[in-house]
Amino acid sequence: MAKQDNNPNPTLVRCGSSRWKPISGRPNDSRTKDQIFFNLLLKCGFKEIEVGFPAASDTDFDFVRKIAKSRQPNLDDVAIQVSVDICIYMLLGIIFQASKAKTIDLAVRHAELVRQLSDDAISRGDRTEWQFQYSPETFSQTEPEFAVEICEAVKKAWLHGKDMKKSHPIIFNLPATVEVSTPNVLHTHNDSGTGVAATELGLMAGADRVEGCLFGNGERTGNVDLVTVALNMYSHGLAPNLDFSDIKEVIDIVTECNDIPVHPRHPYSGDLVFTAFSGWHQDAIKKGFAIQNANSHWEMPYLSIDPHDIGCDYEAVIRVNQTMLPLNPELNNNDGHKRTAHSAHLSTLKIN
């Protein structure tokens, strides 16, 4: 069990399995790989999954139709989402050289168009459940007052007098929401190396949906790593409701499908994350294991979670390097015999 830390306000952390959303941020070259990856996300417990771009290729279209026609029991509580080719750029200063009033008018007309398309589909008996997401990607670079104004105009155009909660939900995909009555969505990238940190701050502020990729794959430097965010929460005693109890299987499938390796020092997932090379660290971990049985919670120097919790063992926890030695270190191997660091050179010991 992970240690319970004092969260600034745990009641504001509204994060459950139904609000994690992995997005399509990978090459798409095989229907077989798509199915394997999709099954992995289901096994991990994701409840909202963006499965592809049906209009992009026959492969995507056929895969989405296959899922739609399937009657898998494990899909009963899973929301399958697709991206459609309705993407409107509204960078008034760079792209269109438009005024604020013209930009708002453009946004409203686009929202009305999409609303009309959804209304027409519903009137024909289409059972698709429509959600409208408005994503001003330059939100952080504009005046807050204008951001509020344009979002309010889009919301009014989309709802058109209808009940948002019952029929026409709308999502504002912003770094921080400007309207408390809408879902608060986080969609961070790692361009400045702060994807995980920004997401965690957003969760503490009350966000209830996180969009990202497994192991931080995605556009440019990648979307936020959902594995790291989820296991960070777990390490602080907050249940992310995602199952990474067999992290090696997740790594193998994602690596095979994406053809992108996981770095050896990637948080929680790399080959070296539970390995201590420094003699001082080795000594602290050795003493931590000596008293761990008396603790009801996992409390170990330099190891934020128990490797067993994600399907790893203690095989690589201590790696002895004679160039970095603690004072008179002694490590117990799995046979119970003592061994000094001076007698080993870059060897691996088990701690049981």
Image: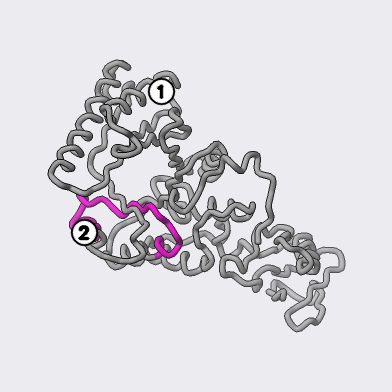
The residue sitting at 29% across, 37% down in the picture is: 168
Q: Is residue 269 above or below residue 120?
A: below
Q: Residue 30: where, in percent of width, then height?
A: 27, 64
The residue sitting at 44% across, 28% down in the picture is: 178
Can the viewer see residue 194 in this picture? no
- Amino acid type, label 1: Val
The residue sitting at 46% across, 65% down in the picture is: 250
Question: In the drawing, what numbered circle is on residue 304?
Answer: none
Q: Which residues are magenta?
A: 40-65
Q: Label 2 crowding class (10 Å Cα cut-off): few <14, some 14-19, many 20+?
A: few
Q: Is residue 218 above or below residue 135?
A: below
Residue 301: in magenta span: no
Question: In the drawing, what numbered circle is on residue 65?
Answer: 2
Q: Residue 127: where, in percent of width, then height?
A: 21, 49
Q: Is residue 109 above or below residue 289?
A: above
Q: Residue 317: where, in percent of width, then height?
A: 68, 68
Compared across the picture, whether 45 is left or right of 129 comes to right
Q: Is residue 174 above or below residue 69?
A: above
Compared across the picture, whether 201 is left or right of 339 comes to left
Residue 45: in magenta span: yes
